[in-house]
Image: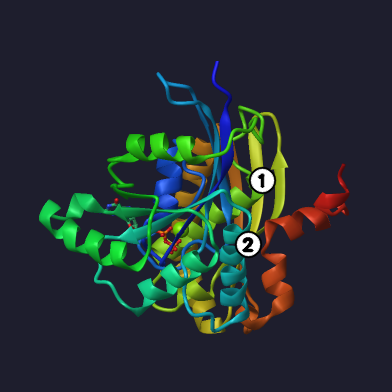
Amino acid sequence: MAQPHSGFVSIIGRPNAGKSTLLNALVGEKIAIVTEKPQTTRMNIQGILNVKPKGKRPGGQIVFIDTPGVHKPDSRLNRKMMQEIHSALESRDLVLLLVDATDRFGPADEQVLELVKHSGAPVMLLLNKVDRLHKERLLPVIERYSKLHSFQEVIPISALKGEGLEVLLDKVIRALPQSPPYFPEDQLTDQPERFLASEIIREKVLLQTGKEVPYATAVIVERFEDKLRLLRIAAAIFCERDSQKAILIGKGGQKLKQMGTSARMELEKRFGKKVYLELFVKVKAGWRQSAAFVDELDWRRQLENLTGRTPSTEE
Ligand SMILES: Nc1nc2c(ncn2[C@@H]2O[C@H](COP(=O)(O)OP(=O)(O)OP(=O)(O)O)[C@@H](O)[C@H]2O)c(=O)[nH]1
Ligand SMILES: [Mg+2]
C-alpha cells in the first residue's frame, strides 16, 4: 500500500476571505468561529483531517491552520495576530492563499501576496465565494494573480457551499510529503475545549453587537467544570469602556441574556450535555494595548497557568 502523506497546511488571506469557513468545511465540524465581521479570528487554530487513500491517490493526514486575516497592525492585539500569521507561514509544508474572488484586487491583496511569497513555501491559490460570481468574472482574477506569482494550483471554491473542496483535498494530499500522521486519528483540533467555549461566546458577542464593540471585546473562561451530565462555565466578557459595558449588558440585562442564551444553546449542542453558563462583563481600559493581557488571551498561556507547566516541559 502507498505510504501516507501528511503535513501542515496554512490558510492565509485577508480578513473575511472565508478562511475559518473553509477550515470548518474541510474538517466537517465547527471548530473556528465565523462572522461577517472582519478580524474575527485572533489566534491560529489547527483543524486535523484524516484522508483515506482513493485509487492512486495516497491517504494521510492534513493539519490545516486557520489564521487571523492579514492587516496593518495598530495595537498589541493586532501585532499578536500578525505574529500568529508569521508563525503559521514558518511551520508549514504548503500555503493556501485564500482570496475573496468577489472583491476588487487592491493594495491589501498585494500585502498578503508579498507575505506569502516571502515565506518561500509552495502556494496554491484558492478563489473563494464563487457561488456569488459569474464564471466569466473569474478569468480576469486568475490572469491577474498568475502574473504576480507562479502558483502550484489555482482552484475556484465555495467554502460556504462546499464546492471544489474534493478537488482541493486531492491536490493537497498529493502535494504533502510522505510521512506518518502527526496526531491520533480521533483528534480534530489542537485547541482545548475551554478555549473553544470562550470562542463560541465571543462569536455571539460579535454577532449581536455593532460598531467598535466587537473589536474591543475579549472573552476568558474563568471556570470550566465538566461533570457527567452538566458543564458549568463561568466566563468574563472584557471591554474597554463603561459605555461598551452598558451596550453589552443592554437595557435590563437583555443583551447579555440574549448572548448567553445563544451561546449556551450552541455549547450544549457542541458538548452534548446541559450547560450552566454564567457571563460577567468587565472593563479593562485599553486592554488591546496591553502586552500582558493580550498574552493572557492566548490559550497556550492559559494552559500553562492552569497546569503550572509549559508545553515544552511535558515530555
Ligand atoms: N457567499 C459566500 N460567503 C462566504 C464563503 N465563505 C465565507 N463566506 C462568508 O464570509 C464571511 C467571513 O467568513 P469567515 O470564515 O469568518 O472569514 P475569515 O477569513 O475567517 O475572516 P477573519 O477571521 O476575520 O480573518 C462570513 O459571513 C461567511 O459566511 C463562500 O464561499 N461564499
Ligand atoms: Mg476567521
Amino acid, disc 2: Ser
Can you tell which mark lies on residue 87? Answer: 2
Above or below, comparing residue 12 to residue 282 in the picture = above
Judge by depth and name the residue closer to the eye, 82 or 282: 82
Which residue lies at the image location 63% right of the left edge and 47% below the top edge?
A: 191
Query: Does the residue at mark 1 contact the one at mark 2 (Cβ under 8 Å)?
Result: no
Pinpoint residue 132: horizontal percent, then vertical percent. Answer: 18, 54
Q: Quadrant of the N terminus?
A: top right
- In the picture, the quarter occupied by the C terminus is top right
Residue 129 x, y percent position in the rendering: 26, 54
Q: Earlier in the sequence, mark 1 or mark 2?
A: 2
From the top left corner, tell me how far across and down residue 91 is, in percent. 63, 54
The colour scheme applied to this rendered structure is rainbow
- Considering only vertical position in the picture, is 226 above or below 94? above
Left of 295 or right of it: where is 246?
A: left
How crowded pointer 2 is (Cα within 10 Å; few <14, some 14-19, many 20+) is rated as few
**Number of numbered discs overlaid on the protein picture:** 2
Tell me: residue 151, above or below residue 49.
below
- Taking depth in this image into account, of 127 and 215 the one nearest to the observer is 127
Closest to the observer, 176 or 221: 176
- Residue 107 position, x and y percent, is 35, 79
Q: Nearer the viewer, residue 203 or 96?
A: 96
Name the disc covering residue 192, or none.
Answer: 1
Q: Which mark is residue 274?
A: none
The secondary element bearing badge 1 is classed as loop
- As shown in the figure, which amino acid type bears the numbered disc 1? Pro
Outermost residue toward the top in this view: 1
Q: Is residue 34 visible?
A: no
Give the residue at x 28% y 72%: 105
Residue at x 41% of width, y 67% of height: 14
Q: What is the C-alpha distance between the residues marked 1 and 2?
A: 20 Å
